[in-house]
Every structure is written in structure tokens, then in C-alpha cells.
Amino acid sequence: MSPKLFSIFIDDLIIVIQKLPVGLELGNGNKLDLIVYTDNILIIITTKLGLKTQLNAIELYGRANEIKYNPEKTYLIVFNKNVTRGVARKRNDI
């Protein structure tokens, strides 16, 4: 799928994710919950529940729109101020 077609097709998913009560609160009622670039989606969450909520929404959207996600290209990176290094895991491990 071309990047332009992907952007048009995935626009509804962006709206779904933005309506979820998860993401990184920036203040003044603003939050950062995802970054989309060409055919890549970066979801940003601050809790395990938020991760589960976003992944469930993405999975449901994929099923409803016959989108197949590639778990081989899906990673989880954990940033924690109490841990000196991040943890990266494949989607199958989540």
C-alpha cells in the first residue's frame, strides 16, 4: 500500500485512538497518543492498561477493516526513569 493510500485508509484509526482516554498528558488538555509517519504508527502510553486499551482498539479496527498487522515489525520499548536501560519486545511477547 502506498503511503498516501495508507494515510487515507488509516485516518479513521487515528480518530479512534485520539478519542481513547490514554496517552501522555502534556497539560492544558493536550495529550500525545500517537505519531504516524508514512506507513508506521507509534503509539504512546504511560500505563500497562493504556497499552492494552490502545492495542485492543487497533486490533478491533484491523479486524473491521481487514487490515493485517505484521507482528515481526511490531515492537514495545519501555522507558522508565527507575531503569537504566529500555526493554524492547516483539508484539508476540506482549
Image: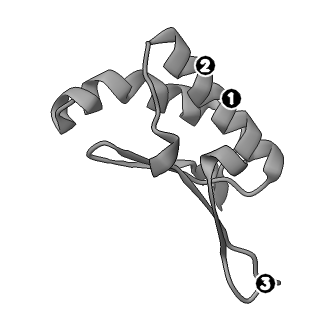
Left or right relative to 27: residue 11: left
Q: Position of residue 93 (x, y in %)?
A: 71, 50
Left or right relative to 30: residue 83: right
Q: Which amino acid does label 1 sit on?
A: Asn
Q: What residue is shown with label 1?
A: 56
Tell me the distance, in whole angstroms, between the alpha carbons under discs 1 and 3.
27 Å
Q: Mark 2: which secondary structure?
A: helix
Q: Where is residue 81 in the image (x, y as percent from the top left)?
A: 76, 82
Q: Which of marks 3 and 2 is nearer the N terminus?
A: 2
Left or right relative to 54: residue 43: left
Q: Position of residue 89 (x, y in %)?
A: 64, 60
Q: Mark 3: which secondary structure?
A: loop
Tell me the distance, in whole angstroms, between the alpha carbons under discs 1 and 2.
6 Å
Which quadrant of the view contains residue 49?
top right
Count neighbours of disc 3 (C-alpha within 10 A) and say few if under 14, some if 14 to 19, many if 20 or more. few
Foreground pick, 19 / 4 = 4
Q: Mark 1: which secondary structure?
A: helix
Task: Give the answer, above or below, for where 59 lies relative to 79.
Answer: above
Count neighbours of disc 1 (C-alpha within 10 A) and say few if under 14, some if 14 to 19, many if 20 or more. few
View extreme (top): residue? 64
Count neighbours of disc 2 (C-alpha within 10 A) and say few if under 14, some if 14 to 19, many if 20 or more. some
Q: What residue type is labelled 2?
A: Leu
Label drawn at residue 10: none
Q: What residue type is labelled 3?
A: Val
Tell me the distance, in whole angstroms, between the alpha carbons under discs 3 and 2.
33 Å
For the rendered model, the colour scheme is one colour
Label drawn at residue 83: 3
Q: Earlier in the sequence, mark 1 or mark 3?
A: 1
Foreground pick, 66 / 32 = 66
Label drawn at residue 60: 2
